[in-house]
Image: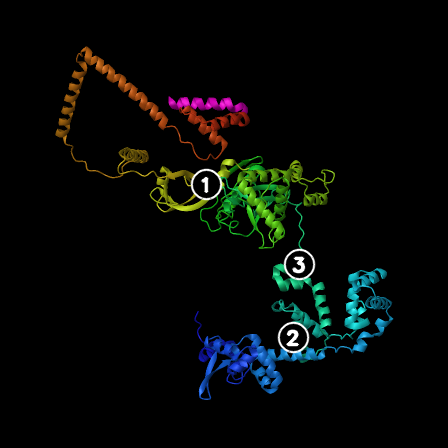
């Protein structure tokens, strides 16, 4: 790879602009002595790096450093710009310069901040080396009074003397083992004592012997500055020794009294032990500080059941098999949990979680337990999708009457949230979003751990290896999953879902919840409930007996609410969606460009439910396109269009017939002669028809006429049946109430239709549970009305 060479002009103009600006701010001339004007020869640079001159010349040729060419002894040579060398080499140059030429080093320190720091470091290292305590002489080091007077040291010294004086005929190791047994120590301990004695005499046998130093009291200003150095976020990666070096330089400049490195360690240890929140704020910012201080402890006893449900997504630590492809994958799911009763409220499992999965889980919870008042979720993309709450929508929420055990609940479109759209707006549910990475009140985070442990305890195989765990154990887990997959014993996705449903049921019915028991204990429910076996479903039953009742939502309304939604415009009676054209005759009534809301099942585009101004309009289906060669299809399309046109013409005539013509016409004489000629022609035709009707027929003509009459009667009867069949109403996709569904079924039967098995079972249940005694009278009223309509 070619590397471009540096140019002196480019380097001076762009590489060190910040240093020039700093010099100008200090009032110094940028043309003075600084690192920009310091050039080193090849030999000087080689000495700094500790390499050969040829290596430096090769790097100069490759353009690794900024250089200039000078003439020497009739030839040319490289000179290397100091500021283009690595930082550690520059520091080394400044340190050697401070030792050899202090005056020149001082000039560089004044002109260049980097040189000032490097020279200060070198001086500090020199002072630290000079201030280090000198080692004691050999005599003092091996014959300290404390070592001579210590009984334990004398015992060790006696054992060492016996061990090194090996009698004749003994092996060294055997003799030392015998001495260790005599003094009741191990052989390794005796060998360690011998090594210490040989290195430092009797003094080394002292236990944790240290030379006592006189401690120096730090000035308060110095202590505060040391704390600031250690707590500064920019210094969090620096070592304590480096921080102390800077502290010592600053103390010399300010005239503070400080102690040695050991006393600085004591102050820093004090900061770590007594100021841990400050350390957390330095290392992890505001979130770390929030986690380091005392949290806010919440109680859920003041909540009603399902007043707030908390939800979260989870990728399960299990491998399962896809029934269609046979490949292994890890399922993902979304689970809702009630904050008050801790019941698993609803869940949905699939390959990848999204807003549709969240909606399905919420749908399950509403079907089983009733509608919640608030949903508490993370602040992620699916949780904040327009599918749940669209604040910028101009369509508005759907006005649906929900029938339940506690009366009717209406999502009012005239309230302050009428401009909102989405599942939450349709259900009148409020939303709460957790703080990012700090959701301490979301108990669902820990619930997943219990659910997965229960899955393992219930014998579900295919567990994923632990992230960051023991490599040997993880290898065994991976091999087991591979073996189960190859043998066809890995659970299928359906089997996993079945096991998870069973586990959730166990969690709600038979899993003792410590947090719920503590909550019941604070509510003083010990007399009413068993606090040692506190189950979520039992606590829900207790709250139900004490007045709480669920809010039920009709199933037909839920199907409509949890559909995916979009906004499209009607043009010429059609809607374009997903590269397909949808239509219904009702859409012809809308003006071109009218915005409507469409809803459809996730992944199913066969039918679009059209809603306008919060009201159901129709079910639009994909247009069946005509053909240039299929004459029958073309004829059918034309007939349908003629019928539609005829329908609109009849509607038009019904509106305009009672209205008088407001225009004034001419009163000229009519053409009497033309009228008389037309009357004469009509009279003659009627005479011919009468004569033909009165003429005597032969037997053959009578038989033909009889056959013709019978054929006409059969054709009329067939057309009547087809007309009755055509007049049978189409079954709506959704009914707004059970009464509407029951009424439609009766009308369908009375018009000659036959309902399917599901509608038949529904009619029997509705008559048995809802109408009760009024069922017969209702049926009789409908029959009488139908007979009256039929004449």
Taking the magenta stretch, the answer to whether it contains residue 84 is no
- Residue 296 - label: none
Q: Are marks 2 and 3 in contact (CB under 8 Å)?
A: no
Q: CA distance from mark 2 to mark 1?
A: 67 Å
Q: CA distance from mark 3 to mark 1?
A: 46 Å
Which mark, residue 292? Answer: 3
Element carrying mark 2 = helix
| Residue behind mark 2 | 246
In which image quadrant can residue 633 be found?
top left
Q: Position of residue 4 (x, y in %)?
A: 44, 73
Q: Which mark is residue 601?
A: 1
Measure how far apart labels 2 and 3 are at the Cα level: 29 Å
The label nearer to you, 2 versus 1, is 2
Predominant SS along the magenta part: helix
Which residue lies at the image location 15% right of the left edge and 28% below the top edge? 675
Examine the structure image and report whether residue 788 is included in the region drawn in magenta. yes
Q: Position of residue 44 (x, y in %)?
A: 54, 82
Q: Which residues are magenta?
A: 772-791
Q: Is residue 721 above or below residue 376?
A: above
User: Does residue 501 appear anywhere in the picture?
Assistant: yes
Of the image marks 2 and 1, the number of the one nearer the N terminus: 2
Which of 466 and 110 lies nearest the eye of the viewer? 466
């Amino acid at each position: 790879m070619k590397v471009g060479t540096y140019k002196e002009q480019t380097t001076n103009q762009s590489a060190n602009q910040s240093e020039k600006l700093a010099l100008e701010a200090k009032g110094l001339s940028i043309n003075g002595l600084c690192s920009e004007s310091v050039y080193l020869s090849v030999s000087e640079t080689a000495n700094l790096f500790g390499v050969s001159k040829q290596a430096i010349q090769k790097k100069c040729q490759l353009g690794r450093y900024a250089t200039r060419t000078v003439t020497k002894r009739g030839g040319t040579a490289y000179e290397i710009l100091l500021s283009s060398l690595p930082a550690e080499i520059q520091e080394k140059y400044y340190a050697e310069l401070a030792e050899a030429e202090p005056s020149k080093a001082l000039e560089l320190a004044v002109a260049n901040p980097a040189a000032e720091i490097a020279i200060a470091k070198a001086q500090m290292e020199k002072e630290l080396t000079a201030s280090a305590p000198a080692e004691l002489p050999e005599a003092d080091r091996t014959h300290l009074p404390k070592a001579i007077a210590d009984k334990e040291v004398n015992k060790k010294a006696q054992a060492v003397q016996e061990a090194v004086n090996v009698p004749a005929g003994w092996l060294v190791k055997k003799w030392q083992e015998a001495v260790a047994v005599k003094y009741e120590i191990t052989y390794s301990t005796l060998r360690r004592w011998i090594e210490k004695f040989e290195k430092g005499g009797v003094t080394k046998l002292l236990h944790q012997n240290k030379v006592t130093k006189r401690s120096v009291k730090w000035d308060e200003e110095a202590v505060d500055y040391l704390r600031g150095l250690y707590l500064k976020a920019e210094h969090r990666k620096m070592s304590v020794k480096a921080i102390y070096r800077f502290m010592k330089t600053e103390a010399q400049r300010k005239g503070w009294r400080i102690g040695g490195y050991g006393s600085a360690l004591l102050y820093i240890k004090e900061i770590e032990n007594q100021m841990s929140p400050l350390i957390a704020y330095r290392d992890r910012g505001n979130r770390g500080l929030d986690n380091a201080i005392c949290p806010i402890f919440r109680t859920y006893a003041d909540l009603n059941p399902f007043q707030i449900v908390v939800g979260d997504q989870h990728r399960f630590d299990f491998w399962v098999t896809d029934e269609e492809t046979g490949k292994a994958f890890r399922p993902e799911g979304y689970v809702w949990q009630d904050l008050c009763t801790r019941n698993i409220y609803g869940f949905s499992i699939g390959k990848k979680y999204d807003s549709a999965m969240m909606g399905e889980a919420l749908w399950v919870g509403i079907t089983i337990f009733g509608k919640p008042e608030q949903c508490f979720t993370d602040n992620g993309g699916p949780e904040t999708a327009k599918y749940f709450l669209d604040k910028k929508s101009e369509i508005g929420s759907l006005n649906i009457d929900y029938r339940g055990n506690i009366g009717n609940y209406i999502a009012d479109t005239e309230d302050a949230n009428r401009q909102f759209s989405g599942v939450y707006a349709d259900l009148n549910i409020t939303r709460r979003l957790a703080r990012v990475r700090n959701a301490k009140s979301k108990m669902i985070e820990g619930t997943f751990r219990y659910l997965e442990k229960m899955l393992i305890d219930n014998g579900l195989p295919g567990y994923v290896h632990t992230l960051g765990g023991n490599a040997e154990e993880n290898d065994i887990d991976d091999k087991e999953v591979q073996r189960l997959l190859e043998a066809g014993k890995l659970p299928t996705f359906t089997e996993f879902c079945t096991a998870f449903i069973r586990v959730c049921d166990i969690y709600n019915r038979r899993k003792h919840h410590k947090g719920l028991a503590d909550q019941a204990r604070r509510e003083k429910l010990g007399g009413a409930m068993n606090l040692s076996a506190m189950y979520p479903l039992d606590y829900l039953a207790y709250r139900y007996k004490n007045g709480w009742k669920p809010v039920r939502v009709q199933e037909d309304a839920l199907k409509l609410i949890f559909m995916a939604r979009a906004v499209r415009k009607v043009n010429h009676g059609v809607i374009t969606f997903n590269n397909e054209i949808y239509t219904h005759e009702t859409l012809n009534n809308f003006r071109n460009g009218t915005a409507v809301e469409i809803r459809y099942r996730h992944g199913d585009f066969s039918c679009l439910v059209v809603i306008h101004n919060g009201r159901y309009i129709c079910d639009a289906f994909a247009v069946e396109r005509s053909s240039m060669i299929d004459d029958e299809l073309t004829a059918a399309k034309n007939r349908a269009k003629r019928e539609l046109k005829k329908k609109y013409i009849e509607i038009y005539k019904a509106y305009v017939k009672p209205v008088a013509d407001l225009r004034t016409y001419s009163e000229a004489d009519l053409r009497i002669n033309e009228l008389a000629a037309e009357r004469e022609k009509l009279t003659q035709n009627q005479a011919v028809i009468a004569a033909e009707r009165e003429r005597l027929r032969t037997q053959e003509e009578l038989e033909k006429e009889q056959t013709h009459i019978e054929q006409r009667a059969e054709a009329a009867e067939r057309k009547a049946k087809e007309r009755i069949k055509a007049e049978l109403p189409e079954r709506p996709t959704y009914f707004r109430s059970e009464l509407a569904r029951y009424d439609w079924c009766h009308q369908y039967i009375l018009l000659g239709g036959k309902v399917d098995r599901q509608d038949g079972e529904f009619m029997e249940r509705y008559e048995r549970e809802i109408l009760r005694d009024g069922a017969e009278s209702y049926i009789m009223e409908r029959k009488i009305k139908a007979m009256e309509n039929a004449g």
